Amino acid sequence: MSERKATIASSSGLHARPASLFAEAAGEVGVEVTIAMNGAPVEDAMDASSILSLMTLGAGYGAVVVLRAEGDGADAALDSLVKMLETDLDAV
């Protein structure tokens, strides 16, 4: 299983527009991706392609989250999703 940490760069955190953009991207990477707050148990991870999960995560600006994926293409998928989270999606 591949894992990456990312710091949320959007000023509104993973809420509304940034969550929508990220959920869409996570759903298109070809592997199942989960997201959790840094330090949370693995079993608390949520579906990263679910906007509802992202908004209930409570990841505000500057929060560190952990993305996990398994399978062919997992590393590339996580790298692209980390880059997205570390971009201010409110400004895009």
Image (cartoon, rainbow, N blue to C red):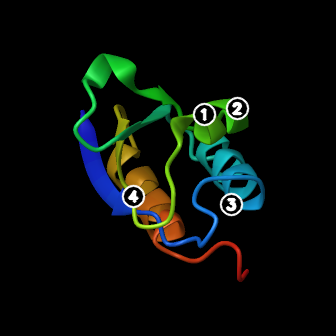
Q: In the rendered image, which quarter is residue 43 located in?
A: top left
Q: Position of residue 75 (x, y in %)?
A: 33, 51
Q: Position of residue 5 (x, y in %)?
A: 29, 55
Please rate how many residues cluster around mark 3, counting C-alpha atoms within 10 Å: few if below 14, some from 14 to 19, many from 20. Answer: many
**Residue that carries the numbered disc 2 in the rendered image:** 52
**In percent of the image, x 58 and y 70: which residue is there?**
10
2 or 4: mark nearer the eye: 4
Compared with residue 1, is residue 78 higher up or lower down, i.e. above or below? below
Q: Looking at this view, name the residue that lies furthest to the top.
A: 43
> Quick one: label 1, few (<14), some, or many (20+) residues within 10 Å?
few
Q: Which residue is mark 3?
A: 18
- Classify mark 4: residues with Cα within 10 Å, few (<14), some (14-19) or many (20+): some
Circle nearer the viewer, 1 or 3: 1
Query: Which residue is denoted by mark 1 in the rendering?
Result: 56
**Which residue is denoted by mark 4 in the rendering?**
63
Lower position in the chain sequence, tag 2 or tag 4: 2
Q: Amino acid at mark 4?
A: Ala
- The Cα atoms of the two marked residues, 4 and 3, are separated by 14 Å
Where is residue 63 shown, x and y percent of the image? 39, 58
Q: Is residue 1 above or below residue 7?
A: above
